[in-house]
């Protein structure tokens, strides 16, 4: 992530590397995108931007070993993504590994009838609930945060749009895909998986049920959208 590089390598080093890798125009867009993100928290009094190390996450359960650190989503690019992705808004939007809840807040603005976040870190669940209570946009009464392991979360039949910001390692991703396939056997419906920074996309690609329908590349984010056949 560009902002992470700034923290780790220093501003001058990071800018030189970015200019060599991306060129002037693309580097400028990256800097502008990074600079915009903290303003969301300043405006709403929320806490979505700061990273949280995996050792601070208060994670318990069988998949504790597969936990990853909390990495903030770009507010600016998420808003852009929701304008681009064509998925129905009348169903339920589920953010799997919802972290501090930023994507849920933007989804509530985007018109989803119901928004659910699933997170197995009690630390992040508490922050997400506090952010929902503080947020002055959207409809907070539409949003629910569930403290649960995604691999064991039982999907509801009205859940149709699933959002993942590279939240899992392979074993947890396999558990989610298996649960979603079983849910579709119980209740046949069209679903969509919006996968941001798709580090485990090979798990969905290997499924006989899902097919990639769209791909987007924003300034800092790669996104793949899947749907069932």
Image (cartoon, rainbow, N blue to C red):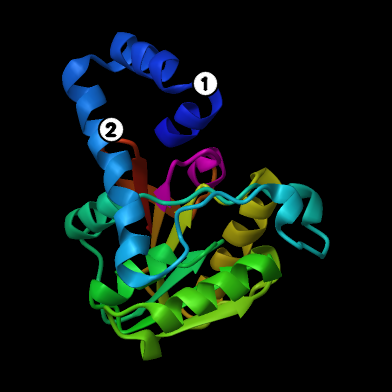
The kind of secondary structure element at disc 1 is helix
Residue 196 among magenta residues: yes
Alpha carbon distance from label 1 to label 2: 15 Å
Q: Residue at x 67, y 54 (%)?
A: 172
Q: Is residue 149 above or below residue 17?
A: below
Identify the image quadrant of residue 16: top left
Left or right of residue 102: residue 57: right
Q: Nearer the viewer, residue 121 or 90?
A: 121
Determine the image quadrant of residue 90: bottom left
Residue at 33% x, 36% y is 220
Percent x, y for residue 66?
A: 74, 49
Which sits earlier in the primary sequence, circle 1 or circle 2? 1
Q: Which residues are magenta?
A: 195-205
Q: Quadrant of the C terminus?
A: bottom left
Residue contact at pointers 1 and 2, CB within 8 angstroms: no
Quarter of the figure with the N terminus = top left
Foreground residue, 54 or 228? Answer: 54
Residue 136's x, y, as percent? 30, 80
Question: Does the image show residue 215?
Answer: no
Q: Is residue 205 above or below residue 208?
A: above
Q: Residues within 10 Å of mark 2 (few under 14, many from 20)?
A: some
The residue wearing badge 1 is 9
Image height check: is 106 above or below 137?
above
For label 2, the residue is 31
Nearer to us in this view, 17 or 66: 17
């Amino acid at each position: 992530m560009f902002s992470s590089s700034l923290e780790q390598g220093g501003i001058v080093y990071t800018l030189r590397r970015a200019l060599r890798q991306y060129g002037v125009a693309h580097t400028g867009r990256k800097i502008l995108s990074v600079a915009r993100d903290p303003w969301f928290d300043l405006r709403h009094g929320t806490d979505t931007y700061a990273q949280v190390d995996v050792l601070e996450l208060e994670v318990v359960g069988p998949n504790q070993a597969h936990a990853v650190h909390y990495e903030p989503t770009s507010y600016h690019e998420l808003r852009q993504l929701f304008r681009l992705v064509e998925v129905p808004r009348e169903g339920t939007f589920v953010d799997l590994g919802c972290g501090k809840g930023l994507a849920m807040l933007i989804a509530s603005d985007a018109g989803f009838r119901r928004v659910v976040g699933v997170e197995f870190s009690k630390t992040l669940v508490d922050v997400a609930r506090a952010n929902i209570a503080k947020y002055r946009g959207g409809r907070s009464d539409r949003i629910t945060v569930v403290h649960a392991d995604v691999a064991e979360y039982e999907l509801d039949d009205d859940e149709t749009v699933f959002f993942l910001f590279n939240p899992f390692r392979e074993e947890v991703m396999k558990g989610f895909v298996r649960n979603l396939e079983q849910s579709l056997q119980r209740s046949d419906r069209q679903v969509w998986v919006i996968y941001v920074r798709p580090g485990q996309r090979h798990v969905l690609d290997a499924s006989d049920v899902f097919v990639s329908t769209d791909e987007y590349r924003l300034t800092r984010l790669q996104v793949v959208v899947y749907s069932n056949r």
